[in-house]
Each structure stands twice: as structure tokens, then as C-alpha cells.
Image: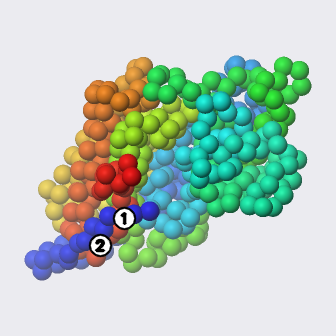
Amino acid sequence: MNFKTLATSALALSLATGVARAETGAADVIGTYADIAAAAYGDSLSTAQALSDAVDALIASPSEATLEAAKAAWKASRVPYQQTEVYRFGNAIVDDWEGKVNAWPLDEGLIDYVDDSYIVSDENEYADLNIIANPQVSIAGADVDAGTITPELIGEVLNEADGIETNVARGYHAIEFLLWGQDLNGTDPGAGARPYTDFVTGDGCTGGNCDRRVAYLRAATDLLVADLQEMAANWDEGGAARAEVESDPDGLLRILTGMGSLSYGEQAGERMRLGLMLNDPEEEHDCFSDNTHWSHYYDGLGIQNVYLGHYTRVDGTLVEGPALASLVADIDPELDAEMRARLTTTMEALQALADAAEGGFAYDQMLAPGNAEGEALIMGGVNGLIDQTKSIERVVTALGLAGIEVEGSDSLDNPSAVFQ
């Protein structure tokens, strides 16, 4: 991982009074930040539990209807979760955990059957392991008994098997693959098209090994719920993540680091610009479901939530409190106005992208070589995210903070390296 260092300087003496006023309000702002995290992770947990119920219904009675309901529940679970990603980069507790639930891209052949066109990378000999079809396998020279698919097998043996990051066996995207199957449409419209009969045990099973596929889906969903229970508890009153940020004298730096890293290197770079440079639909964040446009939108919304100090829960209630925006406005009203305007510009660009995708112009198509309209839509989001990161840098300076490290991306910092 490479980083772009944003060096900052202290405020001029003439702003010393403003800094003191800002610092006295920092604890309140950090409290709001933790309250929003608790609410958003709580919503992530409740929507994952709803997904678990939908998976139960699919397993009990496989049909087009129950499969579609499970897919809808998966998409709904992404809405609050994506808004939590702004917490990742400023909090080690979150960053160390995040790979359990949202790692991507994944070599889906590790999990289940794939099309003959599937390319196995020379860097991952397990990319076509197909654990669902193979109850006895060897990983890193050791024999593995996979006769019973359990959360422990998935989480402790298969996930990142042999230290290879694309061996993603758990989390949202493993479940996404199980529900949708491969998206074989390239840069044409269309998501994965797994038939519901892949979950029919006994007569009528398609794809083979339906009992093991059902077991894998059930175990992976159980793991997701357990992982989200862990993180939701971390942000509740007395939780480890809340206690850590509230006791940290550099708590504001955590907030701004999360905003800047998600804005710049992660979303603008790795999730948007890189895929466009490569014209590669495999670089979509939600590549099996064609839900990428909403993942981008809610990532952006999470950044805005933290700056403005409010979050709308899935039940429609509002969590709000003293905001980072207020601290900035006290010191430099023009900078606060700039930050708000740039966040708005980004969200408008991400909304335009989502509207186009929902209107039939799939994100896959936007990535196609020579598609000027798609490039303009994606780059609208990229440019908005880059510009708001510049404003975040100015906020750091205005608050008199020492400096932050914002995650970078070769796609933004060294484009020629992408093709080496």
C-alpha cells in the first residue's frame, strides 16, 4: 500500500484564539463521530440479520422469489455498511477487521464452480480450488478436511489461504458471488445469473453439490453477522473503538484521516479511476451484482455524514450532534463553505452516476474502452473526490493539526505504474 503524505503547518498566531475554541469542542465532535459509528454499524448488523433471515427462506424453499428476496436483502445490507467505511482508515480496530467483511477483489473459483473462460492467475494456485465441489484439498502443503463446511473452515482455513489476499472466502462479496454467480457480461449490461436451482438439495439440483453450496452460504452469512456484532459492540458505550478514539488527543486527526483516505486513494483511485484506466469490469467493487454505483454513492455519503455530524438510520431516524463543520466554521467560515460545497459536488456526481446506472446504463458499460459518456460519469466522481481531499488538507491546516497520511493510489499518483 502506498501513501500520499499531506504535510501541514500550524496556524498563525493571529488564529490562536480560534484554535483554542476549536479544541474545546473537539470532544463533542468526537462524541458525535462515535455515535454515528455506533448507529451505522448497528444498522449494518440489523440488515445483515435480515439477510440471514432471507438466506434461511431461500434454503428452506428455493425459488426465483426467495432468491430475489435474498439478493434484495444483500443490497439493503450494503446501504449502512458502505457509510461506515469512512471509519476504516483512521481507526486500527476497524482497519484490522475490515478484511473479514469487505475484502475484494476475490478469486471466486476458490469457492464454487466457474465458467470455462475463467482465468487462473499464476499468482494464486488456489484460484480454482472450488471448495464446494472438493471435500478434501491441500493448502500450503497441508491436507485439509473440508467434508463439513463450517464458519471455522471458511474463516480460519480458506480465507486468505496461503497468505494470498485474493483468496477471499468470507464477507459480503463471497455471499454476493454465491447469490448472483459470475457476471459473464464483460462490459455489456447484466449481472450474474445464478439459478435458484443451485440451492435445491436433492432432485433438481444444478451446478452440482447443492447441499455443500447451501452449507457454504449459511456459514458465510453466519460469519458476517458475527463479525458485524463484534464491530457494533466496539462502538457502543464502553466499546473498545469508542474508548480509543474518545481518549485520543489526536482524535480529530483520526476523523480527517478516514475522510481523506477514503476520498482519495481508496474510492477515487482504487475503486473508480483504476477500473476506468484498465477498462476492467473485474475492478468493480460489487462486480457480481452490478451494485457498484450504490457502493460508490454510500461511501461518499459516509464522508459527508462525518463532516456534517449527522446520519440517517435505516428506520429514518436521524443521529446528529456537534460537527466537524462547526469547528471549521468557527475558525474559517469560507473554508467550511468550500468543504460543504465540494462534498455537495461529489455527491451530485455520484448521484448522477447512480441515476445513469439505475436508468439502464450499467457501470460495466461505463468502463468500456472508448465510452466517453461512461468515462465522464466516473471521472465526475473521481474529480469531486480529489477536490474534496484538497479541502480536507486545508481543514487539517486550519485546525492547527500536525499532519495526516492519506492513502494513495498509483492510478492517481503514478499512472504509468498501473501498466507495468
Identified by mark 1, the residue type is Phe
| Category of crowding for the residue at label 2, using alpha-carbon neighbours closer than 10 angstroms: few (below 14), some (14–19), many (at least 20) | some
Q: Identify residue type, mark 2.
A: Gly
Image quarter where the N terminus lies is: bottom left
- Residue 290 x, y percent position in the rendering: 51, 31
Q: Which residue is mark 1?
A: 3
* Residue furthest left in the image: 14
On screen, residue 179 above or below 26:
above
- SS assignment at label 1: strand
Q: Nearer the viewer, residue 377 or 327?
A: 377
The residue that appears at 50% across and 33% down in the rendered structure is 291
Cβ atoms under marks 2 and 1 closer than 8 Å: no
Q: Report whether 202 appears left or right of 141.
A: right
**At which x and y percent is residue 286?**
52, 38
Q: Along the horizontal axis of the image, is 122 left or right of 159?
A: left
Residue 403: image tag: 2
- In the rendered structure, the answer to whether residue 92 lies left or right of residue 417 reads right
Residue 314, relative to residue 309: is it above or below?
Answer: above
Q: Give the camera-side residue of 136 and 123.
A: 123
Question: Label 1: how many residues lie within 10 Å, few (<14), some (14-19) or many (20+)?
Answer: some
Callout 2 secondary element? strand
Question: Based on the displayed image, in which of its 4 quarters is residue 326 positioned?
Answer: bottom left
In the rendered view, tell whether residue 343 sits above or below residue 251: above
- Residue 215, percent across and down? 81, 40
What residue is at 78 percent from the left and 40 percent from the top?
132
